[in-house]
Image (cartoon, rainbow, N blue to C red):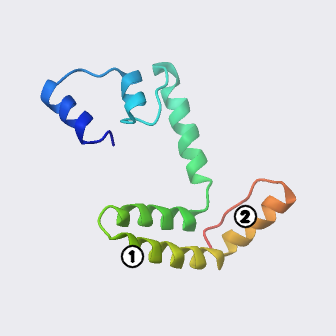
Amino acid sequence: MVGTAVARELFFTAERVSADECARLGIVNRVVPDADLEKESLALAKRIASGPPIALRFMKDNLNRALGDDLASCLDREAERMVEGALTEDYLEAVAAFVEKRAPVFRGR
């Protein structure tokens, strides 16, 4: 996440890194006060859970495959998934919700 140079420095020096520095380096996504951790975590989980499950599954798979597959294979798989996603009921719901200026309700179909 931080690149090899920063990773080596952190490994070799065993320097303690503050939460704010972790956020700056990209080691963590965000830093919140201890008192807000549960509320913020649940809000993020609910936001992700309310998203389109099929598209989220495709995105997760694409990102995981990108760690080891070549670029051409990744681009081919992403194009296939875009077509597959556009054939789902959730895609039609997303388009309708956008046009109607409302929040979509996804059903995983």
Q: Secondary structure at mark 2?
A: helix
The answer to whether residue 98 is left or right of residue 84 is: right
Position in image of residue 20 (x %, y %): 41, 22
Q: Quadrant of residue 28?
A: top left
- Between disc 1 and disc 2, whose residue precedes? 1
Identify the residue shown where x is 46% and y is 72%: 75
Q: Is residue 67 left or right of residue 77?
A: left
Q: Residue at x 60, y 46 (%)?
A: 47
At which x and y percent is residue 14? 16, 25
User: In this rendering, is residue 84 above or below 22?
Assistant: below
The amino acid at mark 2 is Ala
Question: Dividing the picture into quarters, in which one does residue 29 lie?
Answer: top left
- The residue lying furthest to the right in this view is 100
Alpha carbons under labels 1 and 2: distance apart? 28 Å
The reply, left or right, for residue 83 in relation to residue 11 is right
Residue position for label 2: 94
Q: Return the residue at label 1.
A: 73
99 vs 8: above or below: below
Q: Nearer the viewer, residue 28 or 40?
A: 28
Image quarter hosting the C terminus: bottom right
Under mark 1, the amino acid is Ser
Residue 86's place in the image compared with 13, above or below, is: below
Q: Position of residue 19 (x, y in %)?
A: 38, 23
The nearer-to-camera label among 1 and 2 is 1
Q: How many marks?
A: 2
Q: Establish if 48 lies above or below 64.
A: above
How packed mark 1 is, by other alpha carbons closer than 10 Å (few <14, some 14-19, many 20 or more), is few
Q: Where's residue 97, x and y in %? A: 79, 60
Q: Secondary structure at mark 1?
A: helix
